Structures are given as C-alpha cells and as structure tokens.
Image (cartoon, helix red, strand yellow):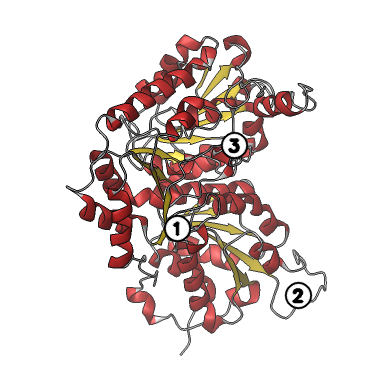
Amino acid sequence: MATDYTVGDLVAEFLSACGVTTVFGIASVHNIPMLDAIGRRNTIRFMMARGELGGAHMADGYARVSQGLGVIFSSTGPGAANTIGGLIEARFAGSPVLHITGQTATKFVDRGQGTVHDPADQLGMMASVCKGAYRIRSAQNALGVLTQAAVEALTAPMGPVSVEVPIDLQRVKIERPSMLDNFVLPVPAPRVPTDIELDELAARVIAAKRPMLWLGNGAKKAGAAAEKLLDLGFGMVTSFNGRATVPEEHPRNLGGLTGSGMPIITDFYKTVDLCLVVGCRVRGHETNDFHVQLPDNIVQVDADPRANGRTYASQYFVCGDAKATLEGLVSRIEGKLKVAPGYPNEFAELKRNAQAVFIETLGAYGTFSKQLRQVMPRDAIWARDVTQNNTTWGNRVFPLNAPNQNVYPVGAGIGQGLCLGIGAAAAAGDGKTVVMTGDGGFFLNVGELWTAVQENLDMTVIVMNDRGYGVIKRIQDATAQGRRFYADLESPDIEKLAGLSEIPYFRISHADTFGDTVAKALAIKGLTMVEVDMTAVGEFPAYYPFNQKPAG
C-alpha cells in the first residue's frame, strides 16, 4: 500500500503522542526530514536556538518548569557535540531531556569515510554524558527505540537520553503505526516499599525526638506528605535543586541554608537525633565537599538504589518513590511521633536567626532578596546563572513557593542561566519568568537573547554587572592568595545592546532602588532588561564560606 508517511513523520507524531508541545533546536542537513514533518503537522512549537548548547539548556529549563519531556534537535558531529554542555547540566539536574540528532547515511556511518558531519563514535560521545544513547538502525524499529529513549529519560533517576536517526532512514516511507492512535508511554510505576520496610522506617522515626528532613530533587512530588511531617514536628532543609518542595515561607523550612560555612546551623545539627534524607544526594557542592557534619543517625529514602551511602553513610535505607514512601510513613506515625517539647519552636528560631546572620554578611546586597520578593509575582519562575548574588541570596534566602519555580545551573556552570530561563519562559506561557545572571555568564551566550526576542517571551533579564567573574575572584582570594588573574572582562554596553532590538532597559545604581526598578520592568509584557551597576552599588562582600577565618 503506497504511503507518503516517513520515519520523519513518525518522529514528529511520536513527540505529540508523548504530550510534547514545544521543542528546541537548529535545522541541519541531517535533520531536515524530521523538522519538515514537525512544520507540516503544525502541532509542536519549534523554537529556533542560536546554538545547540543554548538549545539543550532551553530543553532542560522547559522540562523543569513543565515537569514533562524537554526535547532538543541538533545536527550531527559538531552540532551534536555542541549539545553536550547542556546535556551534562540536565544530567546533574535530573531533567528528562530527549536529544534527537541525525546521523550520516547508514551505508557510510562508522567507516571514517569523511562524509559531512561524520565524527568518530558519535554514539559513544553521547553515551558518555547521557543516561543512554541509541541509534535507530531500521525503519521498523524506529518507534521502539524512540519509546525506549523517552521512557528512560522519564524514569527515576531522570536524565537526558540521546537518539541518532540516520538521514536516509528519516526519509524511508512506512505504514503509519496504528498504535499511535492511543499511545501511552510505558513508564514504569514508581516503586512502593513493602510494609516491612515502611514499618521499620516508621519505627525509626517514632524513636526520634528531634527529627529533620533533608529533601532533594527526587522528592519534588512529595510536598504534601513532607508538609504533614512538618505539622508533626519535623524541621527541614533542602538541596538547592529540591527547594520549595514545601513553600519556603514555612517557618521550619530552612530551604537552601544547608549549613555550609555557617556554625549557627551546623551546631544545631549536633542536637538533631534523626536526619531523614529523601530523594537527595546530599552532594559536595552544598556540604563544602562533605565537611558539613550531619547527624549520625541518617535514614535515607531514594528511588535509586545506588544512592545508598553514596555520600554520607545511612543507618537505614529504603529504595522507593519519595511520595509513596512519605505517604506510607505519615499514615504510620500520626498520633505516635512525640517530638521533644519546644523543638519545633527551636527550629523556627534557627531559621530566623540563620537568615538574619546570612543576610547581614551581604552588605549593600542584603536587601535585594526582600525587595525582589515584594515585587515579583508569587507564581513567577526564578531562573538564575552562577553569580555572587545567586550563590548567596538567590539560592539560599529568596523564598520560593513551588518546586518548578526554581531553575538554575545545578552543576554550577557559568553562562547557562539565560538559556535555562528561555526554556523556562517557554513552558511558563503567560506566566512571568525572571532571569538573574552576571555579566560574565550573560555574554557567554548573549546570542540566545534573540531567541527570546523572536519568540516574544514574557521574561525580565537582570544582569548583575561587576565587569568580571566575581565568583572566580572569590575563589582566587581563597586559593591563590588574592591573585585575580584573568577575571576582568571588557564587555559591550548593555543598554546599547538592548537598544538593538528595542528591548525596554532599566539601570540600577543604588541598592535601595532595586525592587522599584525591577517592578517597572515586570510591569511590561514581554522581554525587558535590568542592569545592576555593581560598581556603583558597591563591591560584593566576601560570602560563606569565603568570609570564614582559617582555623587556628
């Protein structure tokens, strides 16, 4: 039976069947049939990135906010290689990103014959940074391979998966698979622990008098159960990536104040008799490379069995879905958990005091978090790059209300925030997205600003301009006796840059005008820019842990 339906059409329809409505990428000689199918079907928005690196970050940001599959299309060879930085970040962040790339025609691939964009072992290159990497080797196995890749990306621990579709196979005509009529991705159900495991977990929690939660990215869907634990007397802290699992206005949610470099918090940890770690690596970035001393009694819950003892040793480990496990725990301990009298109030006082101590170290920038929170919509997305401002108040004390509002470079790479924010804004739709970046990070991927212009995204970009790599300077102060080599930058005038596309622009030269000025930018629908002249506001002071005196 004659058909005009091709593997390229299959790719496009498969994505729609998975619920994908927006994808990112760049057209190339080796992906035109797939993108042509997307264009002809007109059910998916294709956002044209200016580079594959930016597009991969956009797909990541989109996945975090939409809580679904993010998709990046790239070319082969150098194009696929350009996605790697973004896919590494997606792996750090646990983002379900599907990377679809072309490949040289099957009769030439892996033969080193010098065809266009023909790298050595592209599949191995992608496998080294993704959860998995697959090649479609025949038209008839295309749907199976795509399904496997999407399922793997969406299965905990989630992450990026890459698929190669050779250019000749993209054009092969096939019968449309009838199973696409009622297609459902066969994502496996999360593991629910056994009654024996949950009973043991409950017994250990009931024995505690001063319990604390430490939640990470894997616990984002467990917010309701986590909040019930707080109602029962728990205190809590989160990884930077697990923030707002419970709204951070809660008096006993320390959020991202993990204790690194802060004795007021680490001394309190010594009084905690149970630390329940859920869906979190308790990674080195947030524990000063594991120098933060946590309570001895750590009980861990994670969907990934490899998490057991990966960083801090656990006294007991439950392999299971965070939401299901905490719900089972709550039902077993309600009316039985008896926390020490006064402990909940002590934890609330710890939060008040720790935030005050932390903010006091920020000098002129200490009011920025409060000013921004007062003018920023409660449901706005908060996307950031690596900057001194984000490393301090942006990650640790700026209160967020929901997990998907929190978008930042988990792997601490510079220059990713703008692109993550563009993807986040695409997912946010009519909601506002606020991006905070330093000048160094902003100019690393400044070309992607025009992706936001072309797509008419509703976002405000705040550039903290200290004319250099401020974070690097702090590290140099601490590790290179203050020798600040190669950390100062000469950059274009940001106001003139904004003027190229008539982007509304605002400048801040005094700390006390920060909130009011950002409010003016937020009041405008569409893309706006705010430059904070940090030279005028004042040098950013040394912050935790760089403000600590060496022992002895």
Between discs 1 and 3, the one toward the N terminus = 1
Q: Is residue 24 above or below residue 533?
A: below
Task: Give residue 288's mark.
Answer: 3
- Name the spot of residue 295 as percent of width and height, x first: 45, 41
Task: Give residue 110's mark.
Answer: 2
In what element is the residue under mark 3?
loop
Label 3: few (<14), some (14–19) or many (≥20) C-alpha neighbours in 10 Å? some
Label 2: few (<14), some (14–19) or many (≥20) C-alpha neighbours in 10 Å? some
How many marks overall? 3
Q: CA distance from mark 2 to mark 3?
A: 44 Å
Q: CA distance from mark 1 to mark 3?
A: 32 Å
Direction from residue 114 to residue 18 in the image, left or right: left
Kindly identify which residue carries mark 1.
69
The amino acid beneath tag 3 is Asn
- Name the spot of residue 397 as percent of width and height, x first: 44, 27
In what element is the residue under mark 1?
loop
The amino acid beneath tag 1 is Leu
User: Can you tell which quarter of the image residue 380 is in?
Assistant: top left
Residue at 24% in and 44% down? 228
For the residue pair 156 and 493, the one nearer the viewer reads as 156
Q: Are marks 1 and 2 in contact (CB under 8 Å)?
A: no
Direction from residue 129 to residue 371 in the image, left or right: left
